[in-house]
Image (tube, grey):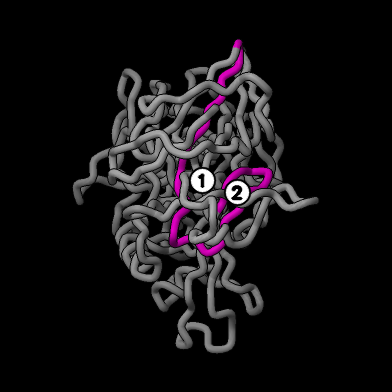
Amino acid sequence: MLWAAERPAGPGHSRLGSPLQIKRLQVSDADGKSTRLLDPAAGVQRIATAESFAGPAGALTLVAGHHRYLVSCIERPEWADEIGRDTFGLYVDIHVPVGQRTAPDGPQTVIQRLRYIEAGQFLMGSPESEAERERNEGPQHAVTLTKGFWLADSACTQALWQAVMGDNPSHFISGKGGGGQHPVENVSWDDVQRFLRGLEKLLPGTLASLPSEAEWEYACRAGTRTPFSFGDNISPEEVNYSGEYPYNEGRKGLNRGATVPVRTLPANPWGLYEMHGNVWEWCADGRRDYAAGDETDPRGPENREAPRVVRGGSWYGGAWWLRSAFRGQGRRGGRILSRGFRFSLRSSGSAGATEWPAPRDGDDGAAGRGPDPAAPGTGAAFAAARSAAAPSAGEFPAAGKLRGTPSREPNRSKAKRSRR
């Protein structure tokens, strides 16, 4: 029988607790391919010892023959207004209040969904064989992230920014009736820090931050090793970028010349929208050179002078900038109309764990509020499983004519040569 981990002794202490029903498992076969199962096969559970759980929110690996089952124990955040599970995995929704001054006649809350990004390991950077790669994307190396986190499923919207900050600095203002669903842009790294502190005040018990560069690439890849999370190439139908500059001799396509509302285009395998394109996204840490060997929870410099990493490319750039491994950077005080951000949340303390909601009949997942923490049978942890110098990418003029590519665009001349 598998046992759940409880933490009655405080942070850093685990002991065996109540029996836990396994709702979902990720099974990986010997060659690395994986299949999601709703229920474990009979006979594969093993008894867990206290040492099987790594830390206060541990993970347990079960091995049965050629299969490996990864089961994590995480806590339901008290700050989550809605919790659920769908085909992409676990999610929470937060409801951020909107003041009368900001939207006197509109919705009084802004809803943001976040996806749980499980701790794990991935290959960071690009292989030398990847087309149009940059030297600073190597050496490709294994990175282990030891802590899971909740990541916004979209870039921060103008509506959410306005709810927290009371203004909207964006160039591409969402039109009337658009609900502020375009990503906020024209915000500096320092501006974002002020937003995060404001969000924490509205959501007590949270630690709001930008993802580290490693966390961002891990979430963007979503288990893939191809140049894009969608495969070896992309098209403007699935990603918002300058279609005049395709990747790896691909076909030219649509150039929208502006941002699109978030969640307009397909999500990656982990339910994250527009990780490629639309707006560059700030990361928490500064620019660094990759280590020659494997790393655990790597972070770049955090001194004030260090340029901050930006990832993902934008509506304004060529497709090669949008690759999962491409690394850009920007001055922390710089504001440009092709750059925004998405944020992550963690709990600042004990989060009041409870059981995860069971799927409803005819539904892939469960939405709505979780069980009453005071109800019988709740209070245990719930289980989940699933599977040279840097270019100044992202540093574009703050305003002006926006046709073609800017003079400082990385690989601008190379792009022209390769497409003559």
How would you rate the neighbour count of disc 2 (Cα within 10 Å): few for under 14, some for 14-19, many for 20 or more?
many
Label annotation for residue 116: 1
Q: Which mark is in front, 1 or 2?
A: 1
Residue pictured at 65% horizontal, 52% vertical: 255
Q: Amino acid at mark 2?
A: Tyr
Mark 1 is surrounded, within 10 Å at the Cα level, by few (under 14), some (14 to 19) or many (20 or more) other residues, namely: many
Q: Amino acid at mark 1?
A: Tyr
**Helix, strand or loop for disc 1:** strand
Q: Quadrant of the C terminus?
A: top right
Residues at circles 1 and 2 in contact by the CB criterion of under 8 Å: no
The stretch of residues the image draws in magenta is 65-91
Q: Quadrant of residue 336?
A: bottom left
Q: Residue 363: where, in percent of width, then height? A: 75, 51
Residue 387 lies left or right of residue 118; in this view the side is right
Left or right of residue 153, residue 306 in this image = left
**Residue that lies at the very extreme toward the front in this rendered image:** 376
At a point 39% along the width and 63% down the height, the residue shown is: 187
The location of residue 306, given as percent across then percent down, is: 24, 45
Residue 136 to residue 13: above or below: above
| Residue at disc 2, secondary structure | loop
* Residue position marked by numbered label 2 in the rendering: 241
Residue 279 shows up from this direction: no
In front of the other: 187 or 360 = 360
Question: Which residue occupies the foreground of this view, 299 or 170?
Answer: 299
Compare marks 1 and 2 and give the one earlier in the sequence.
1
